[in-house]
Image (cartoon, rainbow, N blue to C red):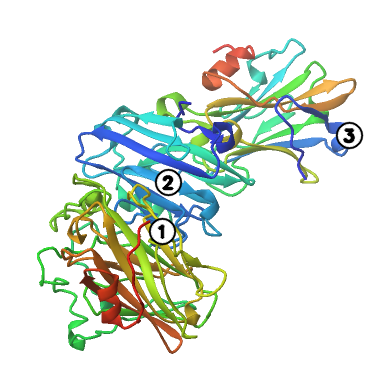
Amino acid sequence: MPITLAKGGNLSLSKQDPSLVNAVLGLGWDVRSTDGQDFDLDASAFLLTASGKVRADSDFIFYNQMKSTDGSVEHTGDNRTGAGEGDDEQIKIDLSKVPADIQTVAFTVTIHDAEARRQSFGQVRNAFIRLVNEKSNNEIVRFDLGEDFSTETAVIFAEIYRNAGEWKFRAVGQGFAGGLGALARNYGINL
Amino acid sequence: MQLATGQRTALATLNLSDQLDIAFDVSGSASAYAPLCFVLNADSRLVQPDAMVSPAQTHSNDGAVTYQAERFRVELARLAPGVERLAFAVVPENGDLRGVRRGEVSVSGPGGPAAANWSFSGTDFGNERAIIALELYRHQGDWRLMVNGQGFADGLAGLVRHFGGNGVPDLQPAAAPTPAAQPAPSGGLNLSRPRGNGMPASSAPSSTNPPSTSSPASTPSPSRPLSLTKITLDKQGQSARISLQKAGTQRVHVNLNWDAKPSTAPTPSGGFLSKLLGNVSGVGKAADLDLGCMYELASGEKGVIQALGGNFGNAGGPPFIKLDQDDRSGASAGGENLFIERPDLIRKVLIFAFIYEGAGNFSEVGGRLSFNDPQGNEVKMQLSNPAALPFCAVALVQAQGGELVITKEERYFSGHRDCDEAFGFGFSWKAGRK
């Protein structure tokens, strides 16, 4: 059973799932069934130092930069409609490969071009984000984007961070105005 | 609370509970904006092919959703099992949503101030000719509200398709189909084809002829293109059957509805939407119709159930017939409801409507009666030949074999006594007031 975490809640991944080394961030949603432009949701990851910023633009893993230089974080591909069952986009994280100077991996979900398309998560059917242990397929945590973030267009879903020698998980669940560009600038990406 | 497009929130956070009103106020370049409610299951599919509430079909089969005067009233606790979602839509009579100057949908407790509302205008839309405005839905045990704000360029057809309706509804005006033209429904509870009771049998299938030429007041009933299981009894003496093979378990719901204000007859040349909207036009004082019945059980017990005198019947014991509500103003969109809990125990039930005050006679009220069973089968009839008398024997329900035979009577009398004499119940009468 996945843990239900309140926004801001955290848990010890080492205690919750000691076998966890390879985690998968899964994002899924339904194809738009009404008329209008597709809902194009994007999952992204940021590798952050203790300062809360990226070391370089290469620490921003998203649809145009699918893999970190160290190979610890990898985006499996952009889905622009939500077509398909289960996760429509995935980001794979190998915790054993995350560089020592990276304190936090932050995960975000954004709606591409939401402002121009006048879209928000509440209009998207069955939109979810979850974290899964790739080996055991255990779902560790899940958010319902439509119910929990209905008026948002960008959300910082969660952070995996180092704490006293173990990996912990924080359900951030914080909406963010301005979309992926604003999020990236917030984390120190030069756009 | 002003709701944004896409916003979702629990009804409890709006201090709304079981009963609520969804009111529409839309103006713009279209001649009318029809509000519609789709009654849906957990997969957002219509629970029955015709599970729509609209100005033309003012109540859901379970009676939980009713419509009157740009407003839906919802009683969540009355929703039939399996209903998990209600979608409220807006369909312009012509043109698209870009023509909306100002639109607002508000949600409130019954008759109360708005607890939440959603405002929109034409600039929010493209070429949509129908939109889903709000949805009420059950999520993890709680009822929630969402602003959908999405729609379809092909209008009502797109909406119906979206909710799993079969085929595209016919938007062209057409003469009301005769009952014989309806497909034979299937299922445990069956409606047979109506007999031409008292008419030449060959007249029944004449689907191309107008249903009646006997009176200028007779109008085609609104088209119900989604209906697979409905039968409309257009002519006096026509009848339909409901099988009682699951005797005792099939409550029959009788609903009398009418226009709070005297109606303007819908123009036969109008489109689908003008028929939808036809019931809400007109001006005048409110009418009060009372629904009642004279019954005779198989046991021989006889009686009268009506609001006048406070004889509301009994659902849990003989006669197992219960009058639900006395609506003296027509303000409740649901009209009046009578439930025959044990149709297997009756010999005959005469359903009547009585004008207590308000409208002088039936010609001003657009009365209509429907019979529904839990399978979604429906038998409907309009008071299509109203007379200047205050009492109308609308329909006779008779047990015949394992079936109920419902016959449209629409015979007008000066009062209960005359009616009783005509139908031979044999009561003794005295005047009463409520």
Between label 1 and label 3, give the one nearer the viewer. Answer: 1
Indicate the amino acid at tag 3.
Lys
Indicate the amino acid at tag 2.
Arg
- Using a 10 Å C-alpha cutoff, classify the residue at mark 2 as few (fewer than 14 neighbours), some (14 to 19) or many (20 or more): many
Q: Position of residue B211 (x, y in %)?
A: 17, 72
Q: CB of mark 1 within 8 Å of CB of mark 3?
A: no
Q: CB of mark 1 within 8 Å of CB of mark 2?
A: no
Between label 2 and label 3, give the one nearer the viewer. Answer: 2
Could you say which is closer to the camera, residue B111 or residue B273? Answer: B111
The subunit carrying tag 3 is: A
Q: Earlier in the sequence, mark 1 or mark 2?
A: 1
Figure check: B369 above or below A118: below
The C terminus of chain B sits in image quarter:
bottom left
- Using a 10 Å C-alpha cutoff, classify the residue at mark 1 as few (fewer than 14 neighbours), some (14 to 19) or many (20 or more): many
Q: Position of residue A181 (x, y in %)?
A: 54, 18
Q: Give a yes or no on whether discs 2 and 3 share a subunit.
A: no
Q: Which mark is residue B51?
A: 1
Q: Which mark is residue B73?
A: 2
Figure check: B51 above or below B228: above
In space, the residues marked 1 and 2 are separated at their CA atoms by: 16 Å
Indicate the amino acid at tag 1.
Ala
Task: Write the residue at 43% across / 41% down.
Answer: B21
